[in-house]
Image (cartoon, rainbow, N blue to C red):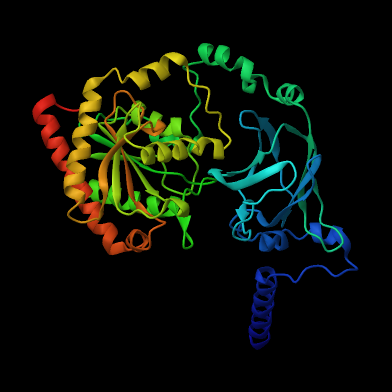
Amino acid sequence: MANRANHLVLLGCGLLCAAALVCAEPTGPSAAEGPKAAAATPIKVAAEAAPAATPSFPIASDARLAGDGKQTRFILDLDRKIEFRAFPLADPYRVVVDVPQVTFQLAAGTGAAGRGLVKAFRYGLVMPGGSRIVFDLTGPAKVANSYVLDAANGQPPRLVLEFEEVDRTAFVQSLAPENRPDLKRAISDTNANAAVVPPATTAALTPAAIPDARPLIVIDPGHGGIDNGTQSGGEMEKTLVLGFGLALRDRIEKSGKYRVVMTRTDDTFIPLNDRVKVARTQSAALFVSIHADALPRREGDAQGATIYTLSDKASDAEAERLADAENKADSIGGVNLTDEPTEVADILIDLAQRETKTFSNRFAHLLMTEMKTTARMHKNPLKSAGFRVLKAPDVPSVLVELGYVSNKDDLEHLVSESWRNKTVGSMAQAIDAFFAKRLATAGPAK
């Protein structure tokens, strides 16, 4: 019995040791065992399968120009190789380079000063997953060569574009057929209703599955992505107005009386026409575009908020200057500004729907009344101009300039959370008053 008991104890110990060996993570084959031994160890493979790392975007660390008015080279330093696509646009002369989403860690002011064939260049996010570099050219030029270099000799990977001077004819011939100036009218007449909405706005344009009778308000924070807007004191308009727009959305939604759609909720570039499409496709009852102005130093100083409605003639020279500047936002993004069909342009200029104009003006007056209780207003707070973003013929629309980033006091307000909360509150009250009057005089909103 004793021998049998000892035998069972030894057998049990052996089984425990064997189980421990099976369960223990192997340390991997020795060099002498070679790849065959490694392949025969499935437990080792499972142990090496680590969770996938969070994807990181390529980083651009430096950008520079070299050359002269005949040949100019652009160099972008990266931390890894990337794919890219370059194409020219005319009137004004530009070259657009689309790349995967890139984190631009470039020195402040990079691209503002040009060289040779490049007047200036801009860069930034153009849609989730995609970035863009836009080169403003001094005249007609082509991309004679473009490539990405591998890291070598202590230098990082580089995106290189080589520009070469050409004449107007050669430049136009290098354009894609749909971008050639002489073909634009014919193409726009044929494809007037074939506009493609970029990924950034697709979700916003999808109609709700269940009908919701509440009025829908579209809030449009200006600029974004590649288009910074005005800048002062290290603050960018696109960031300031996005923060304000999101706060206004939250305040309006909290009441439960309205539906709200944002044209952008992050640092994404949205073309002007697509901002208008959001409102029209959703049959919005109100469109509010949020901006901040800046006055060139040579023109003195100005301060206070201004509310704009659409007009084919600007109410004053300052309104005309601002509208011209804002309407060029699409040029910054490399988008053609001449693709609008003539019949649509005629409708926009004529403002055939007089009711829409009446409602826009009514809301502007209500907004001024409420905002002046919480915010400093411009000496002429109500103006009109030909802003493209206000040109939905069937949606009451206003553009609000919250203040001047070029004015010290206004800038202090624009970065103040307390000021923002009070001003958002006054705008929400104006919206309540507007819909109370509209429902009383014009029936339910669409």
Q: Quadrant of residue 322?
A: top left
Q: Residue furthest left?
A: 440
Tell me: 212 left or right of 19. left
Query: Picture quarter containing residue 285?
Result: top left
Residue 117 percent coordinates (x, y) = 73, 41
Identify which residue is drawn at 13% across, 25% down.
442
Q: Is residue 141 left or right of residue 328?
A: right
- x and y percentages locating residue 364 in the rendered image: 22, 38
Quarter assignment of residue 137: top right
- Which residue reaches farthest right? 32
Q: Does residue 443 show up?
A: no
Seen from the viewer's position, the closer of residues 331 and 49 is 331
Above or below 185: residue 57: below
Residue, x 46% and y 15% (percent of image)? 342
Q: Position of residue 405 (x, y in %)?
A: 40, 56
- Report if residue 396 is visible in the image: yes
Tell me the residue at 41%/34% (across/down).
275
Q: Position of residue 25 (x, y in %)?
A: 69, 70
Query: In the image, is residue 1 above or below residue 95?
Result: below
8 left or right, relative to 34 = left
For the N terminus, the quadrant is bottom right
